[in-house]
Image (tube, rainbow, N blue to C red):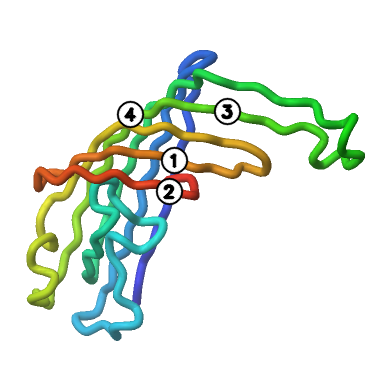
Amino acid sequence: MEFSFSASRFLPLGERFHLATGASGTYFFGRQQPYTLVTGIGYAPSFIRGYEFNVVEGQQFIVQKNSLRFKFFDYAWDLSDFIPFDEISFLPITFYLSANFDHGYVNDRLRLPENQRLANSYLFGYGLGLDFVSLYDLAIRFELSRNNNGENVFFINFRAPF
């Protein structure tokens, strides 16, 4: 038996700032778990910024992500003179600066040798990002993060973090 959850919240903090926060996790109740059901940090959408290049597997995990964003550019071009379709008659372009902090934990009861470096320990990552959002919620994020192992990571994401 398995229990999984996911929750997120968007909090406007004035006209240009907002806070996005979310948590997800899984708890597998049995001692043995088929490998095809093993999850953890590194499987979308449960990742910690700064650990994008890592997968940490286990029977239980929890991840909590936070982003404080500042909207510094927001414009929509009117394309109705060139494109007759209402669905794409405007091209919105928005840029955000973001400050991020993510943290989590993976419990690997089996203590797999290839998993020992990161499993069963508190993991966190923090950093800065530049987010580009456009038509139909197309999101491209450029993020520079540092994790608690002292590793710096630059990563380009093509989806929202929550």
The residue identified by callout 2 is: 157
Q: Residue at x 13, y 63 (%)?
A: 119
Q: CA distance from mark 3 to mark 1?
A: 12 Å
Front one among 162 and 7: 162
Question: Which of the two labelled residues, at mark 3 and mark 2, occupies the earlier sequence position?
Answer: 3
Q: CA distance from mark 4 to mark 3?
A: 17 Å
Disc 4 crowd, CA 10 A, few/some/many (<14, 14-19, 20+): some
Q: Residue at x 19, y 61 (%)?
A: 106
28 above or below 147?
A: below
Disc 3 crowd, CA 10 A, few/some/many (<14, 14-19, 20+): some
Q: CA distance from mark 3 to mark 2?
A: 16 Å
For the residues bearing labels 3 and 2, Cβ distance under 8 angstroms: no
Question: Which of the two labelled residues, at mark 1 and mark 2, occupies the earlier sequence position?
Answer: 1
The residue identified by callout 4 is: 99
Give the image location of residue 71, x and y in percent. Answer: 50, 21
Q: Residue at x 33, y 57 (%)?
A: 25
Q: How many marks?
A: 4
- Secondary structure of the residue carrying numbered label 3: strand
Front one among 111 and 137: 137
